[in-house]
Amino acid sequence: MPVKSTSASSVKSTTTRKRRTRKTSQTAANSVAKVTPTLKTVSVKNVGQSPTKVTPTPKPVSVKKAVKSTAKKVSTKKLKRPAKTVLTLNHYKRDFQSRVKIHNYEFNLFLEDCKKGLQLADKSLRNFYDYALQSYKIHFNV
């Protein structure tokens, strides 16, 4: 039966691993990068052959242009004021009176419903009282 080994590689390390961070340059976006060629002379020793001179080739130059960001303009529609409605004090007075009439009508209907509810409850309670009194007399022979 295989047995798990207790080697040092299976033990977890208590130190945390360093993670790579990316550094951003603030001037990189604004500046133009230039690459200048560097010339380096290399001498090659060939055994048994005549010495040859190696000519260096210049490195290609790449120019990076900074991109200018343009802000987009958001157009908003200009609001127009609606036609002015002139309400006089008489308009408000008639509106208030009509609302009071409606309120009074609905309140009277509410009162009538309450009266009907009380009459129904009174009738039901009287019937219950009569039944309880009758059954008590029959049960106890009073």
Image (tube, rainbow, N blue to C red):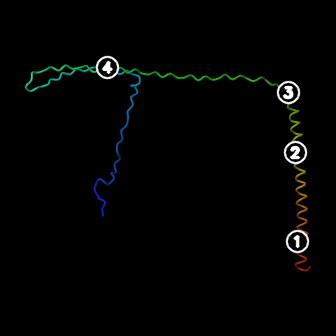
* Residue annotated with mark 3: 88
How far is disc 1 from disc 2 in space, using C-alphas?
Answer: 39 Å
Q: Callout 2: 10 Å neighbours few (<14), some, many (20+)? A: few
Q: Residue at x 40, y 27 (%)?
A: 26
How far is disc 1 from disc 4 in space, using C-alphas?
Answer: 113 Å
Name which quarter of the figure residue 96 lies in.
top right
* Residue annotated with mark 4: 61
Task: Work out whether mark 3 precedes mark 1 in sequence or the reverse, and give the earlier one.
Answer: 3
Query: What kind of element bears circle 2?
Result: helix
Query: What kind of element bears circle 4?
Result: loop
Task: Work out whether mark 3 precedes mark 2 in sequence or the reverse, and give the earlier one.
Answer: 3
* Residue annotated with mark 1: 132
* Residue annotated with mark 2: 106
- Amino acid type, mark 2: Glu
Q: Callout 1: 10 Å neighbours few (<14), some, many (20+)? A: few
Q: Position of residue 38 (x, y in %)?
A: 25, 21
Q: Nearer the viewer, mark 1 or mark 4?
A: 4
Task: Work out whether mark 3 precedes mark 4 in sequence or the reverse, and give the earlier one.
Answer: 4
Q: Residue at x 17, y 21 (%)?
A: 54
Vertically, is 25 above or below 8? above
Cβ–Cβ below 8 Å for labels 3 and 4? no
Q: Nearer the viewer, mark 2 or mark 4?
A: 4
Q: Position of residue 8 (x, y in %)?
A: 28, 54
